[in-house]
Amino acid sequence: MAFHLGGKGLHHLTGGVEVSIAQDVEQMIIAELHILTVLCLIQSVGIDKQRTTLDVIYFLALKLQSRHDADGEVWGAQLSYSKRITRPPYQMLTSMIVYDSRILLEGGNPLLRPSVRQSIDLNLTYSWLTFVTGFTRENDFFTHVGNVYDEEKDIAIFQPDNFDHQDRVYATLVASPKLGFWQPSFTLHYYQQMFDAEKYGAPKKLNKPEFSARLQSWFVIDPTAKALVQASYTGSNHWGFMYRSSSFMVNARLQKAFLKGRLNATLFANDIFRTAKNDVTTYYAIGHTAQDVYTYTQAVGLTLTYNFNASSSKYKGTGAGNDEKGRL
């Protein structure tokens, strides 16, 4: 359904409601209200019997946008609400117990429940600047935790479990100007969990915020070739019951297209300075574990991709099964 008041031009909307007020061709204010309900019927095999589950995803957004065609400036604002079910990976649902050491076992939890995540987000854009902030509450939040398995022999077990809820606040600022052949993208990100870890036996509150920064610099060499230098830094933070130390990484790549885009070659170098470490301390009611290892992400390689259907999308898939494949 669409309503147009005054002005000129043709506006097209598939689904939802659009209200347009246009004073002239150069400036237009658009208010859009979209309600999208996606029902996905998933057939899965449980631990004891076959069960059919129903996933419902709700998305509600109010969007305001103004276009100034004369000077190229664009501003917009969007307020959205979403509700989604997050189902645990199948490996978390296993009943198998694995021997890690004489004092530590590892296993799944067949009784693990899906979590329900509700989010409110505000998105503001102006020209090449984007600012996003929001709040999320995830009920039945699931993560790994350590429990006593055999008190007499001092054996613990590491397995996933559900917790009442986890709250999160976050904000991201992105600047993506186009300066000729140089097209950089600067990202500043803030994230903080509000999770009562002490309630579940952790020795202290684990609500340290995360501050991160990322720079992606694209260099357009010609219409068929471009280069990328990417640097990212993430400060120390808390997630669930974990303390994660700071990390830093630099990657680079060179891309070239041949045969009218059908053949693409990419030369890449990941973790150039060998700085991507996994330094994590996890706290439990029965103690804590620490891990400080290199993740072996440093690599140099060449990939070749040939597209057999570059000009037509008739046979291209939509990726509808990606979430389920990710669980596997």
Image: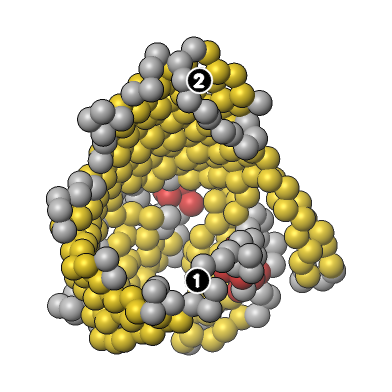
Q: Compared with residue 268, is residue 168 higher up or lower down, i.e. above or below?
A: above
**Colour setup of the view:** secondary structure
Residue at image point 65% right, 80% down? 96
Say what amino acid the circle numbered 2 marks.
Ser
Q: Which mark is residue 20?
A: 2
Is 122 situated left or right of 58 in this image? Answer: left
As displayed, is residue 75 above or below residue 102?
A: above
Q: How much space separates mark 2 and mark 1, taking CA atoms?
A: 36 Å
Mark 1 neighbour density, 10 Å: few (under 14) some (14–19) many (20 or more)? few
Q: Residue 269 at what x, y percent from top left?
A: 23, 80
Q: Quadrant of the N terminus?
A: top right
* Quarter of the figure with residue 46: bottom right
Count numbered badges in the picture: 2
Figure check: 8 above or below 153 = above
Residue 215 or residue 102, whichever sits in front:
215
Mark 2: few/some/many CA within 10 Å (<14, 14-19, 20+) = some
Residue 310's tag is: 1
Does residue 252 appear anywhere in the picture?
yes
